[in-house]
């Protein structure tokens, strides 16, 4: 290692300017100084490394102190939450509570095991089977009672009907399309001595585009063991027996007018006495004819209007008072309003002075002479 004293002497001489200019560049002195410089650089590097190591450990020690402080704080907080039991009494109390809890758990486990053992016994399994059977029977009874409840509308009635042809007909009268709707057009209650005919209902059916009018039909309400209703439509004529159906016009009368939704009506094709009375009362009331949704009166009249024989011919002419019978039919006219009959010759004599019916005073007779002159004429009234 370079002698520090030697270096110091050389430096002092330079400072005091004791060397000449040539002396300053003496090779020996330069070598000594260079060597010293290198040693100083080496010592400087070592010193820097020591400083770096010292800084690293200083940071590590600080981190360790922070961790120790955090753990100390956690221990302090745990001490506050979990206070140690100091007295023997508290220790005994805690042990007793734990034992009671364990006893309850054991008791519950025993009960569960007991229930399982009961299920394993054949007698108990049989009891459960019997109870399940009773529950099933109860559910079936509830379903049967629901099925036996009478329908409240046409939709519910359809669910009770088994005949697919009848279901299709019932769905038709539910249509909201105007051309498919059915309307009441008139009702004549039979006042004659005929016991078979109760009354005649006039029906307007589907709109005919070619004729530009609705098809008209008649439903006769009969006192007949074979069936209470007869309709002039083709469906009733050809399919009533063949397909065992009730035509849509009779369905309209039963469901829309009578409000009867009994499936047995469509099997027996009859109404009981109470339902028949209800239907006849509705057809005779003004309310049903004021309801434009189910009734439609065609405001036109023709010569055939005065030649409709809807009741039995067994009364007398209101003009000549001669008795009338079926043999007089070719020479008779009927009042469009009251349906009473009159000789055509007597009607002409009457209409020379009057323009109304001789019995009900209906003014529809004022159109008769015009229609008589042109039988194909149709007068809108």
Image: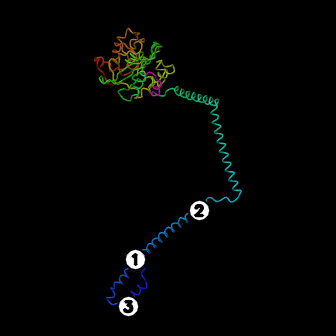
The magenta stretch is: 154-163
Element type at mark 2: helix
Residue occupying image coordinates x 30% and y 19%: 371
**Residue 153, horizontal then vertical, whole percent:** 47, 28
- Nearest to the observer: residue 72 or residue 140: 72
- Give the Cα distance between marks 3 and 1: 26 Å
- Give the Cα distance between marks 1 and 2: 51 Å
In this rendering, would 96 be left or right of 241?
A: right
Residue receiving disc 3: 16
Q: How is the image coloured?
A: rainbow
**Residue 123, horizontal then vertical, whole percent:** 65, 29
Q: Is residue 187 above or below residue 70?
A: above
**Residue 185, horizontal then vertical, whole percent:** 39, 23
Element type at mark 1: helix
Q: Which mark is residue 41?
A: 1
Label 1 near label 3: C-beta < 8 Å?
Answer: no
Q: Is residue 27 above or below residue 292?
A: below
């Amino acid at each position: 290692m370079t002698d520090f004293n030697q270096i110091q002497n050389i430096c002092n001489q330079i400072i005091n300017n004791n060397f000449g200019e040539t002396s300053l560049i003496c090779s020996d002195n330069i070598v000594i100084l260079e060597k010293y410089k290198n040693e100083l650089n080496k010592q400087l590097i070592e010193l820097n490394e020591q400083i770096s190591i010292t800084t690293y450990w200083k940071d590590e020690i600080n981190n360790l102190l922070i961790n120790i402080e955090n753990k100390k704080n956690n221990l302090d907080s745990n001490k506050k939450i979990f206070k140690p039991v100091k007295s023997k009494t508290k220790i005994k109390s805690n042990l007793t509570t734990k034992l009671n809890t364990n006893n309850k758990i054991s008791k519950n486990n025993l009960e569960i095991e007991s229930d399982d053992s009961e299920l394993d016994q054949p007698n108990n399994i049989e009891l459960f089977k019997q109870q399940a059977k009773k529950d099933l029977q109860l559910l079936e009874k509830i379903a049967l009672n629901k099925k036996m409840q009478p329908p409240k509308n046409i939709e519910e009635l359809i669910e009770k009907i088994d005949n697919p042809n009848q279901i299709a007909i019932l769905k038709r009268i539910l249509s909201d399309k105007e051309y498919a709707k059915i309307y009441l057009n008139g009702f004549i209650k039979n006042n004659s001595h005929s016991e078979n005919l109760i009354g005649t209902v006039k029906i307007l059916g589907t709109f005919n585009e070619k004729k530009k009018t609705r098809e008209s039909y008649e439903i006769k309400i009969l006192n007949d063991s074979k069936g209470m209703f007869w309709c002039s439509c083709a469906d009733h004529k050809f399919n009533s027996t063949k397909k065992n159906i009730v035509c849509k016009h009779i369905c309209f009368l039963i469901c829309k007018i009578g409000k009867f939704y009994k499936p047995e009506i469509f099997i027996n094709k009859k109404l009981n006495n109470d339902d028949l009375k209800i239907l006849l009362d509705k057809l005779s009331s003004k309310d049903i004819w004021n309801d434009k949704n189910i009734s439609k009166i065609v405001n036109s009249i023709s010569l055939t209007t005065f030649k409709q024989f809807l009741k039995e011919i067994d009364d007398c002419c209101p003009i000549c008072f001669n008795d009338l019978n079926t043999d007089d039919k070719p020479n008779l006219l009927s009042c469009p309003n009251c349906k009473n009959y009159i000789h055509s010759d007597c009607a002409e004599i009457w209409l020379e002075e009057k323009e109304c019916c001789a019995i009900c005073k209906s003014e529809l007779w004022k159109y008769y002479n015009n229609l008589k002159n042109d039988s194909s004429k149709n007068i809108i009234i």
